Structure formats: C-alpha cells, structure tokens
C-alpha cells in the first residue's frame, strides 16, 4: 500500500477566445471541471494501475469537497483520512485561450491546514504502507513531519519537490529514499544552474550529500536521469506525439511508486513510469489522461 500525504484541488477551466482586460466581462464558450492537485493526481495514477492507496489530505466544507471525495472513491482510493475542514476547498480557476496560453489562480484553501497532528492521527494506517509519497502543495512543516514519521516507522519516503521553493530545508530531507524533481526544481533546490547533463549530475550530488539516497530527475521528452551513490543512468522517454504534458510528472510518480512497491527494482520502475507518463501526454487533461492497468497494457504492452 502507498500513503500519499498531500494536496487535492478542483480545476475550474474556462476556455476563452482571449484573456479579459481589467474590469471586463467576457463569455467563455466552454467550461470543464477537473480533479487535480499533485497529491491527488499521483494517488489516482497509482490506484488506476492497481496499487492500494491511502490518501491523507484535507478538503473544505463546500460543494467542491463532494466532487473530490467522490473522485477518490471512484478511483478506489482509501478515503479514511480525507479530512473535512471548516475552510474552502483547494480550487484553481484556470483560463485557457485559443492559442493555449493559460492563466491560473491557485486557492490552496484546506490544503494549507493539513497538519502534523493529522499525520499522528493516521499513524497506525500509514504504518501499514510500504511507501510515503509527498509533494510541496501542503505546509512545509507537515512535509517535515511526514519525513520524520517515515523515519520513525521505517517506511521509505518519496518527495516530489513541486512546486519548487527555496524555503525547503534540505537538511531535513536527510534519509529520504527518493527525490523526484524536474530540472527547474533541481536547480532551485541545489542552488546550481542546470543546463547540461553534467550540471544535473553535479546538482544531484548536492542532494546526495545531505543524505538523500536516490535523485530521479525528470527531463520531459528526454526521459529521466537517475543518480545515486552507485552511479548514474539515463533512462529514455518513449517517442510519442505529445498533445498535453500537464500532469506528466504526476503520472510518472504515480506509476514509479506503484511499480517500485510491487517489485523493488528502481531502474525497472523508472523505465515503466517513462512509458506511462509518455502515454499520458498523448491525451488531453491531467487525471483524464491517466490509463488504468488494462488500458496501459492494451496500448503499450506493459
Ligand atoms: P513535469 O511535468 O513535472 O515538469 P517532465 O516534463 O519532466 O515533468 O515530465 C515527466 C515525465 O513525463 C518525463 O520524465 C517523461 O517520462 C514524460 N514526458 C513528458 N513529456 C514527454 C514527451 N514530450 N514525450 C515523452 N514523454 C514525456
């Protein structure tokens, strides 16, 4: 079982001809409501592939919470710690124009209130899991608490340091089994420029030196560079006709977690997660682009 301790939100996407001017009201010919949040996306990807997933997250006391809870249930995710909060749910009003430019507003809402105490209350259930998966859309104090809990319980932790923030204390990430940044996030965390593969390797060693065990850098269409004390390996992405890469990183992490918990082979988990994330970018949307195990097998043979 995988414990995802993180965020959820509801995307409110208006498709418009052009961005409104200040003070202007315009019509949107189309609108979609989608489930998102990095934590929720990663949980959904892993669950669709067949993993048991425990989601520890906070939702508000509004109609968006109903939608989010229903989505977790529909994906077979354990909802025992989807905690109702006297707050607004996390929502993201998104505007997409005809040229696919987007403007996004994130209301973190209840996500900011997930606390160390919430994790303590879930301790016995988290203790049954084989991996804790974290991102940075909740308070950093709660991220630190989750890393400490993983250490106390002897459960490996995977951190996806997104969205990137320079405030994350690397010292407190000591002992983390996997850190999975993209190039921007790696650069910000290490304080080093990241352009060539050599730069990536050097920056990754900053993270290894604080005691993080594996640095798995996602490189978009180039795939992944995996760096550990044993050495480094470039594992290529699949060649696909990319239509929408939003949520590709989350698809990668959901699939990597699923495969690694299943068989403990890091290189193999990265290889399959590349194929899974590559498949997801051929379809529009975030969670809507994540295949189930059966669809994944049918489309890719994995
Ligand atoms: P993020 O979306 O978090 O910035 P990346 O862009 O690095 O993350 O993408 C994550 C993973 O998704 C990549 O490592 C790769 O496996 C897959 N991916 C992303 N873009 C493409 C693409 N154009 N072609 C094939 N695979 C892709």
Image (cartoon, helix red, strand yellow):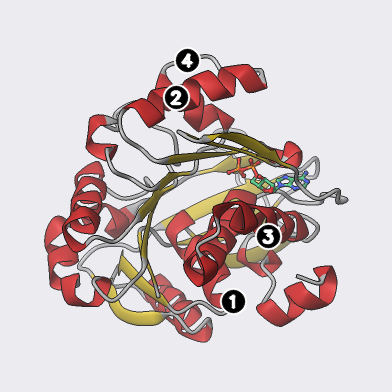
Residue at 74% in and 37% down: 222
Q: Which residue matches tag 2?
A: 205
Q: Earlier in the sequence, mark 4 or mark 3?
A: 4
Q: Residue 102 is drawn in which quadrant? A: top right
Q: Residue 275 is drawn in which quadrant? A: bottom right
**Image coords of residue 291 (percent x, y):** 69, 72
Q: Quadrant of ligand 1?
A: top right
Q: Earlier in the sequence, mark 3 or mark 1?
A: 1
Ligand 1 closer than 8 Å to the CB at disc 3?
no
Between 72 and 207, the residue placed more toward the observer is 207
Q: Earlier in the sequence, mark 3 or mark 2?
A: 2
Q: Earlier in the sequence, mark 4 or mark 1?
A: 1
Residue at 16% in and 57% down: 152
Mark 4 residue crowding within 10 angstroms, few (<14) / some (14–19) / many (20+): some
Mark 2 residue crowding within 10 angstroms, few (<14) / some (14–19) / many (20+): some
Q: Earlier in the sequence, mark 4 or mark 2?
A: 4
Kindly give the residue lying farthest to the front in the view shown.
230
Q: Which residue matches tag 1?
A: 48
């Amino acid at each position: 079982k995988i414990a995802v301790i993180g965020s959820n939100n509801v995307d409110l996407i208006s498709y418009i001809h052009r961005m409104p001017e200040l003070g202007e009201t315009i019509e949107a010919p189309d609108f979609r409501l989608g489930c998102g949040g990095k934590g929720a996306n990663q949980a959904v990807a892993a669950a669709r592939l067949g993993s048991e997933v425990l989601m520890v997250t906070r939702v508000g006391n509004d109609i968006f919470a109903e939608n989010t809870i229903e989505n977790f249930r529909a994906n077979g995710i354990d909802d025992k710690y989807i905690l109702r909060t006297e707050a607004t749910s996390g929502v993201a009003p998104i505007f997409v124009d005809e040229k696919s430019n987007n403007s996004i507003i994130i209301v973190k809402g209840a996500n900011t209130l997930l606390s160390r105490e919430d994790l303590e209350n879930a301790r016995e259930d988290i203790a049954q899991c084989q991996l804790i998966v974290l991102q940075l859309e909740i308070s950093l104090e709660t991220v630190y608490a989750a890393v400490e809990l993983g250490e106390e319980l002897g459960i490996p932790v995977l951190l996806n340091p997104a969205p990137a923030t320079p405030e994350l204390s690397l010292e407190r990430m000591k002992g983390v089994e996997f850190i999975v940044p993209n190039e921007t996030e790696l650069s910000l965390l290490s304080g080093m420029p990241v352009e060539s593969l050599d730069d990536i390797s050097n920056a990754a060693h900053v993270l290894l030196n604080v005691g993080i065990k594996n640095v798995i850098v996602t490189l978009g269409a180039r795939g992944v560079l995996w760096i550990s004390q044993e050495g480094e390996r470039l594992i290529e992405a699949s060649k696909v006709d990319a239509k929408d890469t939003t949520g590709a990183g989350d698809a990668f992490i959901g699939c990597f977690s699923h495969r690694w918990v299943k068989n403990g082979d890091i290189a193999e988990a990265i290889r399959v997660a590349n194929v899974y994330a590559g498949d997801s970018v051929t379809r529009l949307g975030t969670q809507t682009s994540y295949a189930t195990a059966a669809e994944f097998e049918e489309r890719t043979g994995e």
